[in-house]
């Protein structure tokens, strides 16, 4: 313990803030107690005084180091919080960018699905129309061939008649008589 500090505490209790009546503290004279404390201080070895001074200086250095450590720790905490906030902001940007990319990819996927569905529908519609056109063309061709068959049939009939008439033996016609026919 620091003896000088103890002496200072004793002086404070007995001289500076005494509890007593008319200058007497529990039967002690303030001036006498003050004188004794001064003599004790004067008789203490110089090394003890220097040691007490060294202790006080050490305590001051420790207090200063604590203050510096506290300030450094506070500064480190603030810097850490700043870095964490920056990292969070950067992470949020990255996540937002990833979400945007995801949405683009989803939209592209949806567009691709829609395009495929529309292409399939168009192909099916084209197939149906091709079948209908083929049926219509077949019907038209049948009708034309039927009409052609009728025309060809009449032509054939005419040809057959013409051939029949050519093949008939010709009968001599008598004068004055005309051929009936």
Image (cartoon, grey):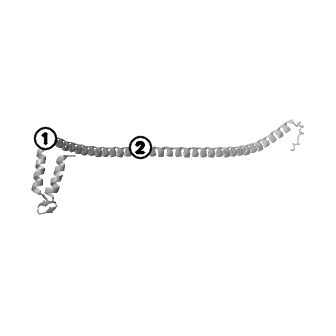
Residue at mark 1: 46
List x then y, in percent, for residue 57. Answer: 18, 43
Report the disc number at residue 94: 2
**Residue 105 horizontal side relative to residue 60, left or right:** right
Nearest the viewer among 68 and 87 is 68
Q: Residue furthest bottom?
A: 21
Q: Residue at x 63, y 45 (%)?
A: 124
Q: Residue at x 77, y 44 (%)?
A: 150
**Residue 150 horizontal side relative to residue 49, left or right:** right
How many residues crowd around disc 1 within 10 Å: few (fewer than 14), some, or many (20 or more)? few
Q: Quadrant of residue 77?
A: top left
Asked which secondary structure carries label 2, the reply is helix
Front label number (2 vs 1): 1
Distance, label 2 to label 1, CA atoms, is: 70 Å
How many residues crowd around disc 2 within 10 Å: few (fewer than 14), some, or many (20 or more)? few
Q: Quadrant of residue 140?
A: top right
Q: Residue at x 17, y 47 (%)?
A: 4
Q: Quadrant of residue 87?
A: top left
Given contact means CB atoms under 8 Å apart, are the residues at marks 2 and 1 in contact? no
Nearest the viewer among 1 and 93 is 1
Report the disc number at residue 71: none
List x then y, in percent, for residue 64. Answer: 22, 44
Asked which secondary structure carries label 1, the reply is helix
């Amino acid at each position: 313990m620091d003896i000088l500090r103890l002496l200072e505490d004793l002086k404070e209790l007995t001289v500076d803030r005494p509890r007593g009546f008319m200058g007497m503290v529990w039967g002690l004279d303030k001036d006498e107690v003050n004188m004794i404390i001064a003599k004790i201080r004067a008789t203490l070895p110089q090394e003890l005084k220097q040691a007490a001074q060294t202790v006080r200086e050490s305590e001051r250095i420790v207090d200063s180091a604590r203050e510096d450590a506290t300030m450094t720790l506070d500064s480190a905490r603030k810097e850490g919080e700043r870095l964490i906030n920056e990292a969070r902001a950067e992470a949020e940007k990255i996540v937002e960018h990833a979400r945007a990319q995801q949405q683009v990819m989803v939209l592209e996927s949806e567009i691709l699905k829609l395009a495929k569905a529309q292409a399939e529908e168009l192909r099916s519609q084209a197939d149906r129309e091709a079948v209908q056109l083929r049926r219509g063309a077949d019907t038209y061709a049948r009708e034309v061939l039927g009409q052609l068959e009728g025309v060809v049939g009449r032509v054939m009939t005419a040809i057959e008649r013409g051939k029949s008439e050519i093949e008939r033996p010709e009968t001599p016609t008598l004068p004055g008589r005309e051929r009936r026919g």
